[in-house]
Amino acid sequence: MKYYYDFHLHSCLSPCGDEDMTPNNIVGMAKLLGLDVIALTDHNSCANCEAITAVGKEAGLCVVPGMELSTSEDIHMVCLFPDVEKAMVFSHYVREHTTSIPNRPDIYGRQCIMNREDEVLAQEENLLLMASNISIESAYETVREFGGFAYPAHIDRDSYSVTAVLGDLTPECNHGFAGISYDADVEKLKKLYTLDGVELIQSSDAHYLENMKEALNTIDLPELTPQAVVNYFARRAK
Ligand SMILES: [Zn+2]
Ligand SMILES: [Zn+2]
């Protein structure tokens, strides 16, 4: 069955994410927009995944625990996991592989970890925008070892994308999928980059509620679970 998705969303945990991007607000907006499945992909942390998956369950919305990983080359990768436990183990791994620089909330914004009632449990102290020491070549295999799936984010953007940093979706980084923004010019991308046989996953990368978009793209899944989403990617991967 086909399900409407958005696999790239930030919560108030991302320093650049608006404080209105709370678990309940994101889930409520996703339902209003007609989405069936979303992924929460905060920068370098999965700490809000537990709250939002619980809120999603109550509301009948499938939420995939995820992360937007900054590789050592400062390339962003969308990482999706089958459950919160696996996501959190990976989140700790990324923390151990990233230099600790304290966040400056006055400059970068607060990084709020929330419970399922949208109450602030804590603020993440380390700035989540730092590059990890995980290279893009090893990121794919590493995320697979943690039970998830990773693909390069927003390849249509001129910053923090594999295309901007390496010049193309290089063979080492091409496992059959790439993320694009809603305003991406697909025909132009296909002329510029090596995208034969690559399935493009279009998502909002919303940092504000008003940037979330009405349901547009579907994914064909046998059942609506985070594991089925990860399986969809893993079974078609190169
Ligand atoms: Zn990004
Ligand atoms: Zn993002």
Image: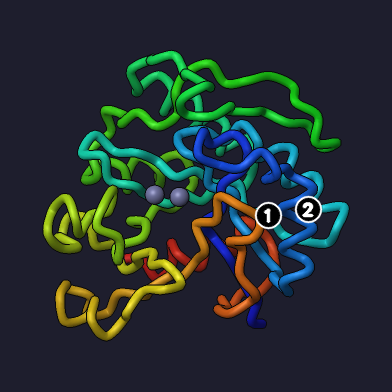
**Residue 52 spot, x, y in % from top left:** 73, 44
Quadrant housing residue 225: bottom right
Q: Amino acid at mark 1?
A: Val
- Front residue (pair 196, 121): 121
Between the C-alphas of marks 2 and 1, the distance is 6 Å
Residue 56, labelled with which disc?
Answer: 2
Cβ atoms at labels 2 and 1 below 8 Å apart: yes
Residue 115 location (% of width, % of height): 78, 31
Instruction: Please name the residue shown 34% across and 65% down the image.
Output: 178
Q: Indicate left or right for 66 with 27 as reference.
A: left
Dot 1: within a 10 Å radius of its alpha carbon, few (fewer than 14), some, or many (20 or more) residues? Answer: many
| Between discs 2 and 1, the one toward the N terminus | 2
Residue farthest toward the bottom in the current orientation of the protein? 187
Residue at x-position 19% and y-position 55%:
164
Horizontal side, residue 81 vs residue 139: left or right:
right
Q: Position of residue 205 (x, y in %)?
A: 49, 57
Q: How is the image coloured?
A: rainbow
Furthest residue toward left: 167
Q: Is mark 2 within 8 Å of ligand 2?
A: no
Q: Secondary structure at mark 2?
A: helix
Going 64% across and 76% down the picture, which residue do you hit? 215
Which residue is rendered at x = 33% and y = 17% of the image?
99
Given the image, on which type of amino acid does mark 2 rest? Answer: Gly
> Between residues 38 and 102, which one lies in front from this camera angle?
102
User: On the image, numbered disc 1 is attached to which residue?
Assistant: 63
Q: Secondary structure at mark 1?
A: strand
How many circles with numbers are drawn on the protein?
Answer: 2
In this view, 95 is above or below 188: above
**Taking 47 as reference, is 30 above or below it?**
below
10 Å neighbourhood of mark 2: few (<14), some, or many (≥20)? many
